[in-house]
Image (cartoon, rainbow, N blue to C red):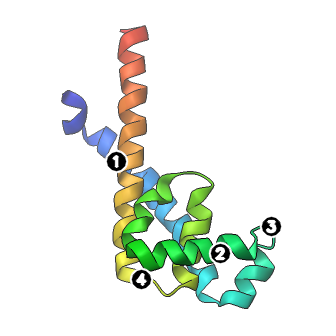
Amino acid sequence: MDLLTNPRAWLAVLGFSVVGIAISLGAYGAGRRGETAVRERFSQISDERWEQVQGWYDRWGAGLLLLSAVPGLATVLTVGAGMFGIRLVPFLFWVSLSKVARNWLIVLLLYGGYQRFFV
C-alpha cells in the first residue's frame, strides 16, 4: 500500500495527532488541579460517573487511555487521568498511540473512499 510510504500522509497523521495530544494534555492539566476544581469545571458529569472512571483506572491503569480517541469519552478519560494520578509519561504514551491509530484509520478510510469513487 503506497499510502503507508507517503510522507504527506504521515505528516497529516502526525500533525492531527499532535493537535489531539495537546488538547488531551490540556484536559489532563485540568484534572491535575484537583477533584474540587474538576467537579466545578465539569459539573455536567455526575459524581457517580467520576467514581466509575476511577474504578476503570484502578482496574486497567493507564492503558485505558487507548480509548481516549473516542469523542466524548476522551474528555472524561483525560481529565480523569489527571485527577486520579496517572503519571505524565504513561499518559502521553497511551494518548499518543491512541491518536495516531485513530488518525491513521481516518486517513485510510478517506483514501479508500477517494480511490473507490474518484480514481
Q: Residue at x 37, y 25 (%)?
A: 111
Earlier along the polypeptide chain: callout 3 or callout 1? 1
Residue 106: assigned label: none
Q: Residues within 10 Å of mark 2 (few under 14, many from 20)?
A: many
Q: CA distance from mark 4 to mark 1?
A: 25 Å
Residues at marks 4 and 1 touching, judged by CB atoms closer than 8 Å: no
Q: Which residue is mark 1?
A: 11
Residue 78 image offset from top left, x and y in percent: 54, 70
Earlier along the polypeptide chain: callout 4 or callout 1? 1
Q: Residue at x 35, y 15 (%)?
A: 115
- The amino acid beneath tag 1 is Leu
| Residue 27 appears in view | no
Q: Quadrant of the N terminus?
A: top left
Closer-to-camera residue (101/43): 43
Q: Which residue is mark 4?
A: 88
Q: Which residue is mark 2?
A: 50
